[in-house]
Image: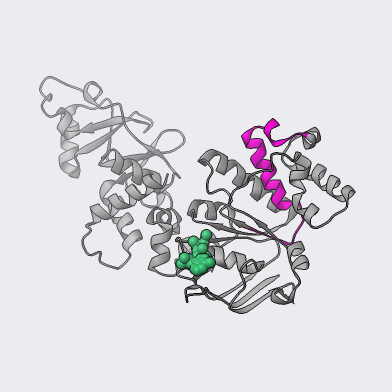
Amino acid sequence: MLQIENLTKIYRGGKVAVDQLNLEIQQGEFIAFIGTSGSGKTTALRMINRMVEPTSGKMMLNGKDITKMNAVTLRRSIGYVIQQIGLMPHMTIRDNITLVPHLLKWSKEKKDETARRLIELVNLPPSYLDFYPSQLSGGQQQRIGVLRALAANQDIILMDEPFGALDPITRDTLQDLIKDIQLRLNKTIIFVTHDMDEAIKLADRIAIMHEGKLIQFDTPDNILANPANDFVKEFIGSHRLIQQKPNVKTVDEVMIKPISITIEKSIDEAIRLMVEKRVDTLFVTDGDNRLQGYLDVEGFTGARRTMKSISEVYEKDVFYVKTGSKLQDSVRRILKRNLKNIPVVDEEHRLVGLVTRANIVDIVYDTIWGDEEPAAATKEEAAGIAVIEELIAQ
Ligand code: ADP
Ligand code: MG
């Protein structure tokens, strides 16, 4: 529905804000523009409804040249939502919702009908239409702000970091709301954000901008699986790459066979097994192979003479993960708690596998660095960096 060809903006003074942008957007798509500050996102968005006049290039909306449309036709087709979603305090909720339809000179009946239809979408009673913003809670006001963006029934809605200033919980709620409404009304939304999580959550396709250029334009899954270059890789963050790497998704794919011993055995038998298998940890199970705990060589060798059975000395506090759980979670646990390994159990709590620190570090290393040899980082460092990044991102 929207085709953009070689769209370029050079501001007075020579700054190339947008450089030969090419993309095509389909009806009903949710598109997120993302990039570092100053990468040209706002400029690109504002050219689409000609708040900023392009220096060169072409934009076609349903086959019509946008640069040749008159302003009224254009505003009827393309809506714009500014950074802050603030309501007009002296206008009723009805008038706030239908602000843009009012500017577009819709009839009173059509505006009223639209306000009634929309307020139902956010589960507020129609009686609220006569209220003033101050009579609503902050959260309710923000939901009305989202409705206002949709009221004029334009084909395309442009939003420039609409949730940027909100606290995380409110942002999350409004993200869900806008996505829900967008799907229900089959709206085309072009959305600027600098938040990758927001882009992944909302967008059908993400346009990654850098220094005025479009670096990659694809679905979140494809971008995460195949970042176009190092900039994109860095931008999306290694913790997301790990999560998406399809061949290392769950613990089951990397776990090895654990060495275990049943709880009624003697300590001498445990030590003999450790020596034979060359391990310093044994997992303790009951007769049905259900995980009870573990024996660590450092923890009991001194007590060997006085203690007779495993049940007297084994460690009952054992961290484990369930079969099928995400490898990423195990990585985090292992590194954060400085564990040597994590046993994997099935639904019946039976011991089925073991993820070791050593094999995790290998996997994280391969995922982040691939074949490239990192300059300074060791495998351990690389794995640590990934986890720190992930913790920061939460
Ligand atoms: P973003 O929204 O990605 O942060 P912008 O589109 O706002 O980026 O800006 C892109 C580049 O163009 C920046 O370097 C910015 O300083 C510059 N720029 C933006 N608006 C103007 C303007 N009116 N005049 C001159 N330069 C501008
Ligand atoms: Mg901007």
Q: Is residue 311 above or below residue 322?
A: above
Query: In percent of the image, x 77 and y 56: which residue is there?
Result: 153
Residue 8 lies, in percent from the top left, at 55, 76
For residue 343, what is the image quadrant?
top left
> Residue 26: percent from the left, percent from the top?
68, 67
Question: Relative to residue 306, is residue 179 drawn left or right?
Answer: right
Compared to residue 69, the image places residue 294 above or below, namely: above
For the C terminus, the image quarter is top left
Residue 39: in sight, yes or no? no
In the image, residue 257 lies in the stretch drawn in magenta: no
Q: Which quadrant of the figure has residue 29?
A: bottom right
Point 31% across, 28% down: residue? 317
| Nearest to the observer: residue 127 or residue 387 | 127
Look at the image and tell me in which quarter the N terminus lies.
bottom right
Please state if 365 lies on the left or on the right of 269 as rendered: right
**Front-most of residues 130 and 357:** 130
Residue 61 shown left or right of residue 319 in the figure? right
Asked if one can make out residue 119 in the rendered structure from this viewpoint, the answer is yes
Vertical order, 59 against 113 (above or below)? below
Q: Position of residue 383 (x, y in %)?
A: 29, 52
Q: In the rendered structure, which segment of residues is drawn in magenta?
A: 131-158
